[in-house]
């Protein structure tokens, strides 16, 4: 699905099109997750949808799609994992997902958002391992909202270059996210230092 087709669907069906396109992409149909989330930001920039409701609908689409994978894992258990392992196309992302879980435990749910395909498999795997829903939702929903905010904002500000940005983030999503976090933390630290320095200067002036 290209951007123009997506915009046409949103123009015709509104928030429902945004939700279902994203949900279908998350559960495995060939709709790139990052592109759909960024397209959600784009349609708000074009004035087709209101920003806050569109963002909330986008979050719900991400969360519900990945929760579907978790529930499927709880239902099928190890049998489903063995079936995935038997298929060649799933072996590499499955190995990556299992390594993340073994190394980082439940935090792997958050990290999986940075990797295409892996983000679909990790909820399935933790569901099949028996993780309870409360723990899953705590990690997945908080990370999902942050992930959605990142790409939604990219789409809002840079939607004209959506195809190029989508290719970059799919290939370098982890490094892009890491870079943005570093920049954000650096900016916060600098602002904090400037605020403390300003306060000390005021104290000196008052003294």
Image: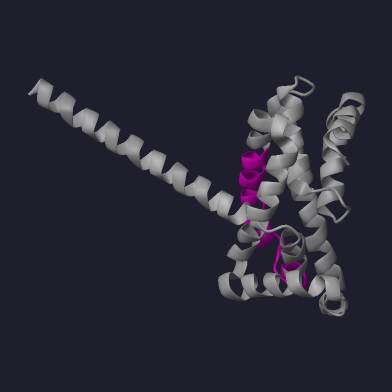
Residue at image location 84% in from the left, 55% down from the top: 27
Main SS of the magenta part reads: helix
Looking at the image, the residue that sits furthest to the left is: 207
Q: Is residue 4 above or below residue 125?
A: above
Q: Nearer the viewer, residue 193 or 80?
A: 193
The quarter of the image holding the C terminus is top left
Relative image position of residue 47 (x, y in whole percent): 75, 19
Residue at image location 88% in from the left, 42% down from the top: 1
Relative image position of residue 64 (x, y in whole percent): 79, 49
Relative image position of residue 144 (x, y in whole percent): 66, 49
Residue 138 appears anywhere in the view = no
Q: Which residues are magenta?
A: 126-151
114 sits left or right of 82 in the view = left
Q: How is the image coloured?
A: one colour
Relative image position of residue 13 (x, y in whole percent): 91, 28
Q: Is residue 130 magenta?
A: yes
Residue at image location 90% in from the left, 31% down from the top: 9
Q: Is residue 142 magenta?
A: yes
Looking at the image, how many numbered discs can be counted on the residues? 0
Q: Quadrant of residue 132?
A: bottom right
Residue at image location 77% in from the left, 24% down from the top: 49
Q: Nearer the viewer, residue 177 or 82?
A: 177
Residue 192 appears anywhere in the view = yes
Q: Is residue 139 above or below residue 54?
A: below
């Amino acid at each position: 699905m290209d951007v123009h087709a997506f915009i046409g669907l949103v123009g015709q069906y509104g928030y429902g099109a945004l939700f279902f396109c994203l949900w279908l992409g998350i559960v495995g149909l060939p709709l790139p997750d990052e592109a759909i989330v960024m397209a959600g930001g784009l349609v708000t920039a074009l004035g087709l949808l209101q920003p806050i409701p569109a963002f909330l609908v986008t979050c719900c689409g991400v969360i519900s799609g990945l929760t579907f994978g978790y529930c499927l894992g709880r239902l099928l258990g190890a049998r489903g994992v063995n079936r995935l392992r038997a298929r060649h196309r799933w072996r590499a992302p499955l190995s990556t997902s299992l390594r993340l879980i073994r190394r980082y435990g439940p935090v792997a749910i958050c990290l999986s958002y940075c990797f295409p395909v892996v983000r679909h498999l990790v909820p399935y795997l933790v569901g099949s391992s028996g993780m309870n829903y409360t723990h899953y939702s705590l990690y997945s929903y908080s990370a999902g909202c942050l992930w959605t905010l990142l790409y939604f904002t990219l789409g809002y500000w840079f939607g004209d270059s959506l195809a190029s940005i989508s290719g970059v983030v799919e290939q370098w999503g982890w490094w892009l996210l890491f870079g943005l976090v570093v920049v954000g933390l650096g900016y916060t630290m600098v602002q904090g230092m400037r605020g403390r320095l300003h306060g000390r200067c005021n104290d000196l002036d008052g003294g």
